[in-house]
C-alpha cells in the first residue's frame, strides 16, 4: 500500500469547520486546508465536502477531509486526515486505490511508528502546546519531543498542531517540521487573511 506524495509542501495548514471557511482560506492563498466538521451528516455532509473540493479546484491549496474518507473518495477530494482510532475502521487500501493522500494524527513514539508503517503522505504530531479546541488524550508534547518525532519520521513530512500561534510559530518551525497547523489562530482572528500571510512569511525567512 502506498499513498501518493504531496503535490507541494504543506507549510501553512488551516483546520477549519466549514466549506465557507475553506473558501476563505483558498482566497487567502493558504497552502493547505482541512475540513473538520463534526455536525453535518448524510447528504448535507456530502454537499459540504463537494463544495470544499470545488473551492480548491484549480488553486494551489491542498484540501484534506477529516474523518469522512468514504465521502472524500466520492467527492474526488485531494486527501483525507484520520486519527489513530480511525485507522482501525477506515479502509486504507480503498483510500490508496482512489489516489487520495493520507495524513495521520500521532501523539507518541508508538503512535508515530504505527502511522509510519502504512506509509502515509504525512503525519501530524501534537498537541505541541495546550489547546482548547479539542479534548486531548495526552499531555502537551512540547518542542523537544517534537524534534524527536521529526527525526523518527525521517522523510515523511511532519505537521505540528496544537496551540500554535504567531507568538510561538518560529520556535515550532525550528524543530524541523514541514508544516504548522492552526485552528483558533485563524478562525478567531480579526483578519484571517493577514494571519495566513504572516505565517507564510515564516517559510520565506528560512530561505
Image: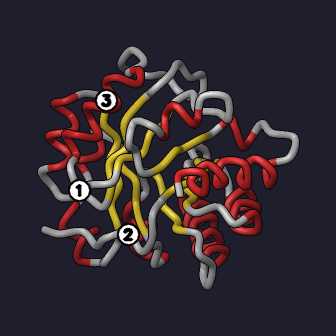
CB within 8 Å, label 3 to label 1: no
Residue identified by numbered label 1: 155
Residue 172 percent coordinates (x, y): 49, 34
Image quadrant of residue 153?
top left
Q: Nearer the viewer, mark 2 or mark 3?
A: 2
Residue depicted at 46% across the width and 52% down the height? 66
Q: Nearer the viewer, mark 3 or mark 1?
A: 1
Residue identified by numbered label 3: 107
Residue 57 vertical placement versus 47 (above, below): below
**Dot 3: few (<14), some (14–19), or many (≥20) neighbours within 10 Å?**
many
Residue depicted at 24% across the width and 71% down the height? 96
Mark 1 element type = loop
**Dot 1: few (<14), some (14–19), or many (≥20) neighbours within 10 Å?**
few
Residue 131 relative to residue 193: left or right: left
**Dot 2: few (<14), some (14–19), or many (≥20) neighbours within 10 Å?**
some
Mark 2 element type = loop
Residue 48 percent coordinates (x, y): 63, 64
Residue 75 vertical placement versus 39 (above, below): below
How far is disc 3 from disc 1 in space, using C-alphas? 18 Å
Residue 40 relative to residue 98: left or right: right
Of the two numbered discs 2 and 3 on the same chain, state the one appearing first in sequence. 2
Of the two numbered discs 3 and 1 on the same chain, state the one appearing first in sequence. 3
- Looking at this view, name the residue that lies furthest to the top: 139
- Looking at this view, name the residue that lies furthest to the right: 190
Residue identified by numbered label 2: 6
- In this orientation, which residue lies closer to the viewer: 120 or 49? 120
Residue depicted at 44% across the width and 39% down the height? 160
How far is disc 1 from disc 2 in space, using C-alphas? 12 Å
Residue depicted at 23% across the width and 70% down the height? 94
Mark 3 element type = loop
Residue 106 percent coordinates (x, y): 30, 36
Amino acid at each position: 500500500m502506498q499513498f501518493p506524495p504531496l503535490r507541494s509542501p504543506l507549510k501553512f495548514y488551516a483546520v477549519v469547520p466549514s466549506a465557507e471557511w475553506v473558501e476563505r482560506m483558498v482566497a487567502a492563498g493558504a497552502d493547505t486546508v482541512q475540513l473538520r466538521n463534526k455536525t453535518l451528516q448524510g447528504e448535507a455532509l456530502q454537499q459540504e465536502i463537494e463544495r470544499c473540493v470545488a473551492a480548491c479546484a484549480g488553486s494551489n491549496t491542498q484540501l484534506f477531509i477529516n474523518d469522512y474518507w468514504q465521502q472524500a473518495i466520492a467527492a474526488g477530494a485531494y486527501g483525507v486526515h484520520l486519527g489513530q482510532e480511525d485507522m482501525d475502521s477506515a479502509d486504507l487500501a480503498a483510500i490508496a486505490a482512489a489516489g487520495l493522500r493520507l495524513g495521520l494524527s500521532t501523539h507518541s513514539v508508538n503512535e508515530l511508528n504505527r502511522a509510519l508503517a502504512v506509509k502515509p503522505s504525512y503525519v501530524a504530531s501534537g498537541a505541541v502546546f495546550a489547546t482548547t479546541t479539542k479534548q486531548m488524550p495526552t499531555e502537551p508534547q512540547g518542542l523537544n519531543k517534537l524534534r524527536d518525532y521529526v527525526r523518527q519520521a525521517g522523510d515523511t513530512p511532519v505537521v505540528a498542531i496544537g496551540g500554535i500561534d504567531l507568538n510561538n510559530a518560529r520556535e515550532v518551525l525550528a524543530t524541523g517540521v514541514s508544516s504548522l497547523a492552526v485552528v483558533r489562530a485563524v478562525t478567531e482572528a480579526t483578519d484571517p487573511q493577514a494571519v495566513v500571510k504572516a505565517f507564510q512569511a515564516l517559510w520565506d525567512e528560512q530561505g
